[in-house]
Amino acid sequence: MSDQTFHLPDVGEGLTEAEIVTWRVAPGDQVAVNDVLVEIETAKSLVELPSPYAGVVGDLLVEEGKTVDVGAPIITIADAAAPAAVVPAPAAAPAADEGGSVLVGYGSAGQVSSRRRKPAERPVAASVGVVAKPPIRKLARDLGVELASVTPSGPAGEVTREDVVAHASQASVFRNIETPEWPDERESTIPVSVATAAPAAPAPAPAAVVNDAREESIPVRGVRKATASGMVRSAYTAPHVSVWRDIDASRTMELVKRLKSSPDFADVKVSPLLIMARAVIWAVRRTPMVNAAWIDGDEGAQIRVRHYVNLGIAAATPRGLLVPNIKDAQDLNMRDLARSLEKLTLTAREGKTTPADQSGGTITITNIGVFGMDAGTPIINPGEVGIVALGAIRQKPWVVDGEVRPRWVTTVSGSFDHRVVDGDGVSRFIADIASVLEEPALLVE
């Protein structure tokens, strides 16, 4: 038995610092191995740190709200037993019947488990007597929602998919050109002759000084700090070019309506973003350079073309802007893509997006329409070449066969790295997306 000092570990994100958000223990508390000591915020996620020791909490060495470097001492544990064996975190959550306590390992493979209970650990007795179809019950289990706490809105007093999702969020056309298949080779590298040197980023502005109640100073850290750094790096490194096009999306809205009423989609959320995602994936195959990356190396620059799509979805969360991505989205059918989008959105709102979910993206969609915006010139996510924005879908007058009719109209805009893709490629890519949104029928599997 001895006193031990717990140092801020590397939680496997390749980051160098983290903010102490909330201490879960106080001096004098008795802790066991795997008891959560503290919640920290890195540039990408909120993480709970479990204790590797059993003993009595001594001193909390860092105040809440302070940012410390990896390796810095943060807490002492008195009369601590020998540290538990550290094991790597499993790639997937263990089965409900595996039992026992597992200390999540720290390091490149480490990932701290969510405080959210696994489905098998959630009470089910409280849901007895609730009217809900089996797919809705499964959705509730997957999202950690107790059906008894959901207010039903169905005509027969049943709980609907929208009820569960809302509750969880609160606690032409193809131009007769054949679409190419995805190559077996997942990446290829195209050498280019000259690497473009990145200009130095501007010096940061001095911290604001608060003189009275009319102003306040907000420290820049965590997600906001990472976002600011990435956006400055992208804006001052990649020469952006932006284009946009107005679209008659009436048939997309008709398809969304049909999918919502389909039994096959009863337990998943369907929105125009789903069709937009499929359109982007389809268009990438036609213009693969928008899915590439500019790589500066010791022997000059290269363009790395990815023959797969890790589709990023920009998500506004209480912690700031996150861009998780759906891995190998090109392999998903419509239903699976809808499930992935719903899971991605709910996880981001809960602040549970992992660093792995935010790394490795190849192209991004930002849905600015949910904020009532028609179009924009978004900044490219670092490490990517293109970002596409979906504007609000509104009923507007539109000329059809020489007559003005009310149609559902939206604008698709995008920004691209001009070092990698030229105007003809950018225009073709946005035109392809427009074609799918105007006539999405051939995308239905």
Image (spheres, rainbow, N blue to C red):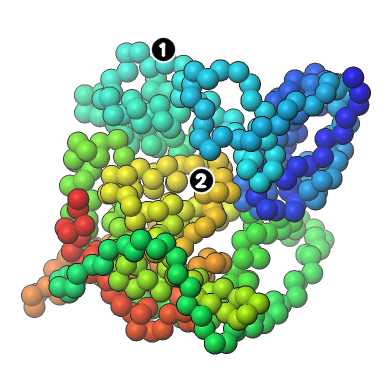
* Residue 153 image point, x, y percent: 29, 30
Q: From this viewpoint, which residue is outermost toward the front?
A: 184
Q: Residue at label 1? A: 125
> Which is nearer the eye, 443 or 304?
304
> Which is nearer the eye, 348 or 162?
348
Q: Quadrant of the rendered structure where residue 226 is?
A: bottom right
Q: Residue at x 47, y 37 (%)?
A: 170
Q: Tell which circle, 1 or 2, labels the residue nearer the N-terminal end.
A: 1
Q: Which mark is residue 348?
A: 2
Q: Horizontally, is 363 left or right of 152 in the view?
A: right
Tag 1's secondary structure?
Answer: helix
Q: Residue at x 49, y 21 (%)?
A: 96
* Residue 215 image point, x, y percent: 73, 60
* Residue 254 image point, x, y percent: 18, 54
Label 1: few (<14), some (14–19) or many (≥20) C-alpha neighbours in 10 Å: few
Q: Quadrant of the rendered structure where residue 138 is?
A: top left
Q: Horizontally, is 234 left or right of 303 in the view?
A: right
Q: From this viewpoint, which residue is outermost toward the right?
A: 2
* Residue 257 image point, x, y percent: 20, 48
Tag 2's secondary structure?
Answer: helix
The three-letter code of the residue at mark 1 reads Ala
The three-letter code of the residue at mark 2 reads Ala
Residue 238 visible? The answer is: yes
Query: What is the spatial separation of the Cα atoms under label 1 and label 2, in whole angstroms?
Result: 29 Å
Q: Residue at x 38, y 37 (%)?
A: 165
Q: Which mark is residue 152?
A: none
Q: Residue at x 55, y 49 (%)?
A: 356
